[in-house]
């Protein structure tokens, strides 16, 4: 998958990033659930975060755009966690934590990081990285961003979702 994603990233850099505004609440579809291994070996189930706004970031250690966004996501996690934000990084490196764990030792990420899989990524249409999905408190997809997000716009979307009640 790494080679295909790398090619897609090159093509995306030519075309530019694609972003989406928040989907109207009435038109949002349920997020596809998955269970993936966390850093501590314990399973992380996406549906277990229902009631929170989820920042679901598909990334990899070799992804340049991902390395731009992750510090922003760390900042958002720190700022908005108490308001109900749950950030989850889905690491799409081919050999999982074998590659991800050494990266995290030199580039700490304080929010939840799981080892991704093609099966978990496929329903989200992951064909390039980074892809960031925003999930509302009811567990529905509110936005899907392909490429590096616009930080200010993305934060505005987070604030809007955090202000929504189920």
Image: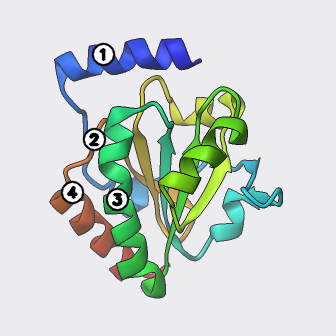
Residue 112's disc number: none
Left or right, 130 with reference to 110: left
Q: Residue furthest right?
A: 42
Assign a secondary structure to mark 1. Answer: helix
Assign a secondary structure to mark 2. Answer: loop
Q: CA distance from mark 4 to mark 2?
A: 9 Å
> Which is in the foreground here, disc 2 or disc 3?
3
- Residue 131 horizontal/vertical position (percent): 41, 39
Q: Which residue is identified by label 1?
A: 10
Image marks 2 and 3: residues in contact by CB distance under 8 Å: no
Q: Which residue is identified by label 4?
A: 151
Q: Residues within 10 Å of mark 4 (few under 14, many from 20)?
A: few
Q: CA distance from mark 3 to mark 4?
A: 11 Å
Q: Residues within 10 Å of mark 3 (few under 14, many from 20)?
A: some
Q: Looking at the image, which residue is at 50% across and 13% down?
A: 4
Assign a secondary structure to mark 4. Answer: helix
Q: Looking at the image, which residue is at 30% across and 55% down?
A: 22
Q: CA distance from mark 1 to mark 4?
A: 21 Å
Q: CA distance from mark 1 to mark 2?
A: 13 Å
Q: Residues within 10 Å of mark 1 (few under 14, many from 20)?
A: few
Q: Which residue is identified by label 2?
A: 148
> Which is in the foreground here, disc 3 or disc 1?
3
- Residue 150 horizontal/vertical position (percent): 19, 50
- Residue 13 horizontal/vertical position (percent): 23, 22
Q: Which residue is identified by label 3?
A: 71
Residue 30 visible in the current orientation: no
112 or 53, nearer to the observer: 112
Left or right, 140 with reference to 165: right
């Amino acid at each position: 998958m790494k080679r295909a994603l790398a090619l897609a990233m090159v093509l995306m850099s030519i075309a530019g990033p694609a972003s989406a505004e928040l989907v109207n609440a009435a038109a949002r579809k349920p997020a596809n659930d998955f269970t993936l291994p966390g850093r501590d070996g314990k399973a992380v189930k996406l549906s277990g975060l229902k009631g929170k706004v989820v920042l679901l970031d598909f990334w990899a250690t070799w992804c340049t755009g991902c390395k731009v966004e992750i510090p922003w996501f760390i900042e958002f996690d720190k700022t908005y966690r108490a308001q109900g934000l749950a950030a989850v990084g889905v690491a799409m490196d081919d050999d999982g934590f074998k590659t991800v764990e050494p990266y995290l030792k030199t580039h700490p990420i304080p929010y939840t990081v799981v080892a991704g899989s093609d099966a978990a990524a496929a329903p989200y249409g992951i064909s390039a990285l980074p892809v960031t999905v925003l999930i509302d408190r009811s567990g529905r997809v509110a936005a899907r961003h392909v490429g590096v997000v616009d930080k200010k716009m993305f934060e505005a979307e987070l604030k809007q979702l955090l202000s929504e009640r189920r």
